[in-house]
Image: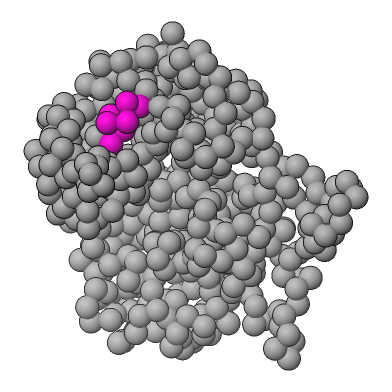
Amino acid sequence: MHAIEVQCLGKAYKRYSNRLGKLREWLFFNGKRYHTLEWVFRDVSFSVKKGESVGIVGQNGAGKSTLMKILAGAYTATAGEIAIDGQPYTINGPKDALNAGITLIYQEINLAPNLTVAENIFLGSEITRNGMVNRQKMEEETELVLARLAARFKASAKVSSLSIAEQQQVEIARALHRNSRVLVMDEPTAALSSRETDMLFALIKKLRSEGLAIIYISHRMAEIYELSDRVSVLRDGQYIGSLMRSELSASELVRMMVGRPLNDLFNKDRAIPKGDMVLECHDLTDDDKVLSGSLNVRAGEIVGLSGLVGAGRSELAQLIFGARKIVSGNIKLKGKPLEINNPRDAIDCGIGFLTENRKEQGLFLEMTVHDNIVMATIERDSKFGVLNEQKNRALSDTAIRTLNIRVPHSQVAVGGLSGGNQQKCLISRWVAIHPKLLILDEPTRGVDVGAKSEIYRMMTDMARKGVAILMISSELPEIVGMSDRVFVMRAGSIVGELDGEAITQENIMELATGATHHMAGAEVA
């Protein structure tokens, strides 16, 4: 018996050609449609048996989160059917999902921190006696659930005093108290340490053995391998297929997720001609994190900047972009001395900077995709303080199409997008300024393999157009696969340069750790 069965599920949004069309449809009841339907995903079918764990994987924007939100009642499906224990269910809201026995545990903890564990578990369904909340009874029943989970905290403890892992246990305890039959977990280990992750895995396996159906979403393949009896793959909003645990392999999963083999991931064109020197940095320092920063980048070249965490890579990029104050040293752009006092100066000179932390330092999460894309070009494209809406709209539409940003329309809030689509949105902002130099700090952090491939393609296209690219990355395969040259930092200083065949993970790590100063093909500072 299947605990949950999904048949031909689909979700579509209304897409209007302009705001006037939306207004006309709202004002006039003549039955005329001023919109088209844009499908986020369609014809998605899968099932999960009792006591089974099914992994759901796919690249960012494939429809995973939307699918899960439909199951949780946060979104309403446009088409398809959902059956629980063989009985069809219509889920139009969170209450319908709870009544069906489905509980979704998000990446972000969804608890009231100032309430106790028991109060959170019974929130909305408090036990009362003579019109008064019976806290003792609630705590007694909560303790029974916590014992089932082998939790090490009390029902009377405030949620704010618990660790992230313990708060997740509270979420799971709430699901068990509601007699949930299906537990959906969306990237549950994102904020957990390795020890806390191991505890969560042990708990998931215990619940699975007790007959609970588990749907597990994760970008981390090791987790998928360990926890899943089956893995279902979504791509471009469609169900691609499933693999049994015995059939799992990294190469096959990537092929199903992306539509091509893993060895095609790095698509750097080595034949792109290198032009004149665009960026020259000589002995840059802030007397703190950066002690000696000297590097250069040519037009059409992707130069990697590698090193261990804390080596000063991001800080060096911030010096070039004007986000940190230069104490000594100098910068040349296309052979001319450059004085940059702030990021606006850098943008005006044709320098774009993709920050490491997109949510806190890059994106305006409450604003639309359109507004985020044109943010760096508003002043350039304005005349006498008046925005050129037509030009801005064309710019954002082109960016969405070129970088394959999966959104129903440009007026969607960027905070609701997947990590990969947020990153592509931020990259498109800097592409829009037509930069001479593009600095990318961890360009593929937190995105899946499909989004990575599209970002790599964008980088190659930009290099082909003559843009100089400086890429900071902690992923050595990325540095090796995409870089024409590599500079390595250690303890705030550039300690070496690698070129051609010398660009290997081993040589990079030797320079980064100071293990050697003598390598063939390497120039050591």
Would you identify the image quadrant in which residue 361 lies? bottom left
How many marks do you count on the picture? 0
17 versus 436 height, above or below: above
Q: Is 75 positioned to the left or the right of 30 in the image?
A: left
Q: Residue 215, position in %: x, y?
A: 40, 27
106 versus 401 height, above or below: above
Q: Residue 458, position in %: x, y?
A: 59, 52
Q: Is 11 positioned to the left or the right of 102 in the image?
A: right
Q: Residue 83, position in %: x, y?
A: 53, 19
State the residue at coordinates (18%, 39%): 138
Q: Residue 353, position in %: x, y?
A: 48, 69
Q: Residue lying at the far top in this picture: please name it.
A: 1
Q: Is residue 20 magenta?
A: no
Quadrant where the image shows the C terminus: bottom left
* Of 192 and 172, the residue lying toward us: 172
Q: Is residue 176 magenta?
A: yes
Would you identify the image quadrant in which residue 106 lies? top left
343 versus 434 height, above or below: below
* Of 39 and 252, the residue lying toward us: 39
Whether residue 249 is visible here, answered yes or no, is: no
Whether residue 230 is visible here, answered yes or no, is: yes
How is this picture coloured? one colour
Give, as a single range, the part of the protein colored magenta: 174-180
* Of 433 and 497, the residue lying toward us: 433
Quadrant where the image shows the N terminus: top left
